[in-house]
Image: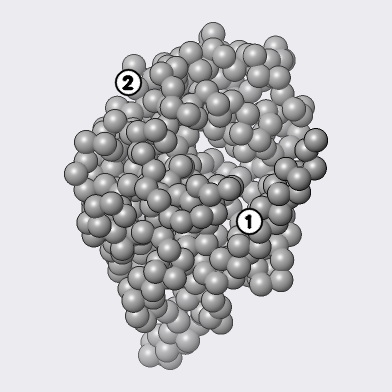
Amino acid sequence: MRHYLAALMFLLPGFAHAAPPARFDAHVAAELQKLGAPGAAVAIVENGKVTLARGYGVRGLESLQRVGPDTLFQIGSASKAFTAAALAILVEEGKIHWDDPVIDHLPDFRMFDPWVTREITVRDLLVHRSGLGLGQGDLMFVPATSISRADTVRRLRYLKPETSFRSSFAYDNVLYIVAGELIEAVTGQTWETFVRERILLPAGMAQTVTNDADRFLAADRAFPHGRLGEIRGVGPQQALDEKAVALGVNCGPAGAIASSANDLARWLAIQLAGGQLAGSDQRLFSAASGAEMWRPVVPVPITPLPGPLADAMPQFRSYALGWAVQDYRGHRIVQHGGGTQGFRAVVVLIPENNVGFAIVANSEDNALVPGVQFELLDHYLGLPKHDWPKAFADFFDERNAGALAALKESVAARP
């Protein structure tokens, strides 16, 4: 009976592929060349074991140094899960509760509407239902600014909402900045110090940094790239000035972490283990907190995708605490993407298979990261193969062509 069960489990889709795809390294390298992207790194964790942590291509078109497993890439909004984990630690210590009003811990905090000021909670800071519009307030940290985190929080009272409180989803970054300020108010430590001491160091993520200043000091770092033709995303790939496209120092809790394949593998293992540190009885957070961070809170509208990408479209999508939770062809996926000027990233967890992977790239090309992401999802879920990088490349090429046509038409129509 034992041998029969073992054979049956091997045949089930969830157990069909317990290793990275065959010739995966050569495939990623070929996609980099095909799409014209300089470099990338991938980390894969299966059943608590790191099965891949590797770099591909070059750190920069000007230096041509190879990407390695410790090369730092900005992960953008995938940083939000670290902020959520920091708050979960404080919840477990009894210093805050998820449904505490924010003003209980930041008495000077104000939103535009006094009623929202009284009602908005710690949980609300993380789930994009405050009533602010999409990306509202981003100009307080992009382009880079010297505005402090405290000053950013004080300025929120002047942002007029676009919808009523808790009525709809609209992705923002500024309320994660509030979450960072709340951590400092409760602990006396900056968000950067708390995340480093309570998450990164215990997790063994020694290379990971929480701000651009520290990233610039790292010798082994990737450099940003983009296409700056008639519209962003069109034209030859070129190196960007990393300091000119840096983020404001205030936005760390929303998107300033830079990490490597090796370190992201450690983060994946901790997430899949419900907060437990690899090879240890110690935890960053409890399994209950891990489940709470993955619990859907706000429904996210789904945008239909055209024919070749239709299978990538989820049937449901929701936002949890620093994570997006959705389905992929009947399977629950916990993930979060990230994008900054010159970088793209995604962190993906497949809880039912105990598999997670992260993909980072040092270019703004939008086809590589999701292309490899969906190829890995198909592989680990035992689904038919599909050329996802080509499908995404075709989609973005068509969209860019439409944007260029619209631009030329608008220019021609000017008197």
Three-letter amino acid code of the residue under disc 1: Asn
Give the left or right position of residue 149, taking residue 399 as reference: left
Q: CA distance from mark 2 to mark 1?
A: 44 Å
Three-letter amino acid code of the residue under disc 2: Gln
Picture residue at 30% right of the left edge, 49% below the top: 222
State whether residue 331 appears in this view.
Answer: no
The location of residue 238, given as percent across then percent down, is 40, 51
Q: Which mark is residue 287?
A: none
- Count neighbours of disc 2 (C-alpha within 10 A) and say few if under 14, some if 14 to 19, many if 20 or more: some
Earlier along the polypeptide chain: callout 2 or callout 1? Answer: 2
The location of residue 224, given as percent across then percent down, is 38, 46
The location of residue 134, given as percent across then percent down, is 66, 35
Picture residue at 35% right of the left edge, 80% below the top: 23
Nearer to us in this view, 99 or 167: 167
Which is in the foreground here, disc 2 or disc 1?
1
Nearer to us in this view, 406 or 100: 406
Residue position marked by numbered label 1 in the rendering: 400
Residue position marked by numbered label 2 in the rendering: 189
- Count neighbours of disc 1 (C-alpha within 10 A) and say few if under 14, some if 14 to 19, many if 20 or more: some
Q: Look at the numbered disc 2 and give the secondary structure of its residue.
A: loop
